[in-house]
Image: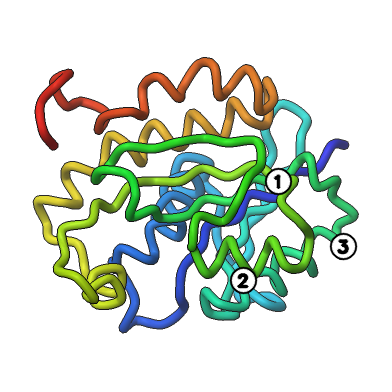
Amino acid sequence: MDKYLIVGLGNPGDEYAQTRHNTGFMVLDAFAKASNAVFSDRRYGFVAETSLRGRKLFLLKPTTFMNLSGNAVRYWLGKENIDQQRLLVVSDDVALPLGAFRLKANGSNGGHNGLGHIQQLIGQQYARLRVGIGADYPQGGQIDWVLGRYSQDEMQLLQPTFDLSVKIIESFVLAGIDITMNQYNKLGKTRPGAQQGKDV
């Protein structure tokens, strides 16, 4: 059976729940809910297992804290003998508007500490889904922004993106990265559900 590792980046602990930097965790929670998968506390992270048309999926929310995310990714790739081409990492991104998203087959870490540590340990050749959290902060305020909590209104704006992310993960597993990028990236330039051309 083909195996896939889907990783959502974030920080463990109640004090980080619903923060912008934990958007990867939220996407994985949405996918787990849609799949009736339940997370359990395992080595280096919370892990849930599910299957999709004969393919086995491991969902991983690392408990290593963001800056050491690569430890969890490398461990679970090795433990389950999963090909790196079947790895998808979901992260937040200040360079994209709130709720916009971008799927890439590989590339740089874009200054993201979690992606940066993964890159240190396994290189750049892995797929990543970046979800926009916006950049509405003053100069020097990025850390407070990413570790700040979403408002209720922002969570409502993000819900269509979370729903679409579930479909993107399914497509990545069933159709592959290239087809999925072609199908979904055009939808990710603005927040899903927003009127085209409106500032969101």
Q: What separation in Å lies between label 1 and label 2 (alpha carbons)?
A: 14 Å
- Pick the residue in front: 95 or 182: 95
Q: Quadrant of residue 11?
A: bottom left
Rendered location of residue 90, percent (x, y): 52, 50
- State which tag comes first along the sequence, 2 or 3: 2
* Type of amino acid at the residue the image marks with label 2: Ser
Q: Nearer the viewer, mark 2 or mark 3?
A: 2
Q: What separation in Å lies between label 1 and label 3 (alpha carbons)?
A: 15 Å
Q: Nearer the viewer, mark 1 or mark 3?
A: 1
- Pick the residue in front: 174 or 200: 200
Decide: marks 1, 3 in contact (CB < 8 A)? Answer: no
Decide: marks 1, 2 in contact (CB < 8 A)? Answer: no
Left or right, 196 with reference to 163 = left
Residue, disc 3: 78
- State which tag comes first along the sequence, 1 or 3: 3
Residue, disc 1: 126
Q: What separation in Å lies between label 2 and label 3 (alpha carbons)?
A: 15 Å
Secondary structure of the residue carrying numbered label 3: helix
The answer to whether residue 177 is above or below residue 95 is: above
The answer to whether residue 122 is above or below residue 195 is: below
Residue, disc 2: 69
